[in-house]
Amino acid sequence: MDFLSMAKARYSVRKYKDTPVEAEKLQKILEAGRIAPTATNAQPQKVLVLQSKEALEKAKDAARFYDAPVLLVVCADKETAWKRKYDGMNSYQIDASIVTDHMMLQATELGLGTLWICWFKEEVLREAFDLPENIVPVNLLAVGYADCEPASPERHAELRKPLDETVKFL
């Protein structure tokens, strides 16, 4: 499947089968995140892989992840991330989001469903997983086998703005 076809086929999964994600697939997903570009190649990402019943139970108080068998907590070290000199903008959120996107698309290519989650209680994750102050949870990525009808790849024709509304050639 070419990239655009795969990207159009990806959708947010909110119902998962009670089937574990194979270790080989999980490693490939994590590798996709590892090779993701980051500002100045600082690689500030720290990914927590929650897959044990105990870890997933702890995370339930932080976010709704629809009983996915794997929850990736994508964090970033705000101390080691690149900072723009003239205004101090810190790239940690951008870097963590690029990592999340790479892992999400790799999961799609492997036949797994995902849900990118930004609505979560940071303080619950911090306490549950003993995160130091410099490590910031940025995104959650639920991963597993979808137990629902896939969204139509053609939905983007109606749900997305046309290019002429989002792109300007100069």
Image (cartoon, rainbow, N blue to C red):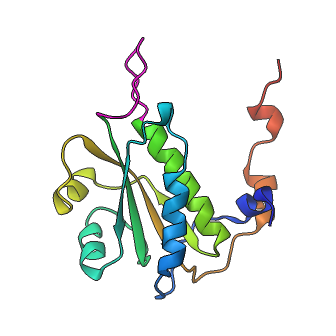
The image position of residue 134, as x and y in percent, is 24, 40
Q: Is residue 90 above or below residue 17?
A: above
At x 74%, y 33%, the residue is 166
The image position of residue 63, as x and y in percent, is 34, 63
Task: Say which quadrant the C terminus sits in.
Answer: top right
At x 58%, y 79%, the residue is 146
Q: Is residue 26 left or right of residue 88?
A: right
- The residue closer to the viewer here, 71 or 159, is 71
Residue occupying the far top of the picture:
86
Q: Is residue 4 left or right of residue 103?
A: right
At x 41%, y 63%, the residue is 72
Task: Say which quadrant the N terminus sits in.
Answer: bottom right
Residue 167: which quarter of the image? top right
> Any magenta on residue 118?
no
Q: Is residue 112 above or below residue 164?
A: below
The image position of residue 155, as x and y in percent, is 76, 61
Circle count: 0
Q: Is residue 25 left or right of residue 164?
A: left
> Any magenta on residue 90?
yes
Q: Is residue 85 above or below residue 42?
A: above
The image position of residue 56, as x and y in percent, is 31, 74
- The residue closer to the viewer here, 112 or 154, is 112
Residue 28: which quarter of the image? bottom right
Q: Main secondary structure of the magenta part?
A: loop
What segment is highlighted magenta in the picture?
79-91
At x 38%, y 67%, the residue is 64
